[in-house]
Amino acid sequence: MKNVLNTLLILTTCLLVLSSFTENDNSGTGYQIGDVATDFSLKNVDGKMVSLSDYKDAKGFIVIFTCNTCPYAVASEDRINALDAEFKKKGYPVIAINPNNPAIQPADTYEAMQQKSVEKGFSFPYLYDESHTIYAIYGAKKTPHTYVLKKEHNKLIVKYMGAIDDNVRDGSQVKKRFLAEAVNELLHGKEVTVSETKAIGCGVKA
């Protein structure tokens, strides 16, 4: 009986240790800082296919996984427009991607995306990840979830990922603009000081 209890104790300890690693280890779940990001070809709200390779003069990209419905994403819409206005002319345009499956989240249909783009006056492409694969390759878990990519030797290198800023609920209360600060550092030839933050938002529904 004592041996059985000892065995159970050892197994329980092993499971707890394994669980700890599983909860904290992000390897194999998407991109890490310094990884080479894949290009894609996704349908924009205007019906045209868009790839990052279409932007020959871009220095990099601000890729944002977002959607029509999540309150956090909705609260970020004006900030995403502002980011595009601030950085597109400097070589870092915004590319927004909706990863959600409308079979799970009915208000995230392509038609609803088109309506949202018009209502909010989106100045950037709003792409539909219809196969629900690109978000998984990138490792996006939330809406919004952001990535800053920099062109280096014809490759797209992940330089920042996580939140837009430190107050996704209320743009008027933002104190740290994580994404903007990362892009500005890259534009000045510096390495990104804060390269990863925790994305706050609704879970991707795919």
Image (spheres, rainbow, N blue to C red):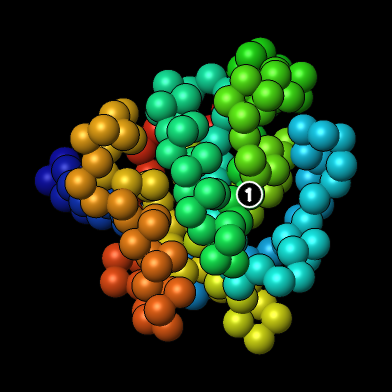
User: In the image, is residue 5 above or below residue 73?
Assistant: below
Q: Residue at x 74, y 64 (%)?
A: 55
x and y percentages locating residue 154 in the rendered image: 70, 81
Q: Is residue 197 left or right of residue 204?
A: left
Residue occupying the far bottom of the picture? 153
Q: Is residue 188 left or right of residue 176?
A: right
Observer able to see residue 63: no
x and y percentages locating residue 22 in the rendered image: 37, 52
Q: Residue at x 32, y 46 (%)?
A: 165
Observer able to see residue 1: yes
x and y percentages locating residue 54 in the rendered image: 80, 62
Which residue has dot 1 on it? Answer: 95
Q: Quadrant of the C terminus?
A: top right
Picture quadrant where residue 59 is located: bottom right
Q: Residue at x 77, y 33 (%)?
A: 45
Q: Identify the element where label 1 is drawn.
A: strand
Q: Amino acid at mark 1?
A: Ile
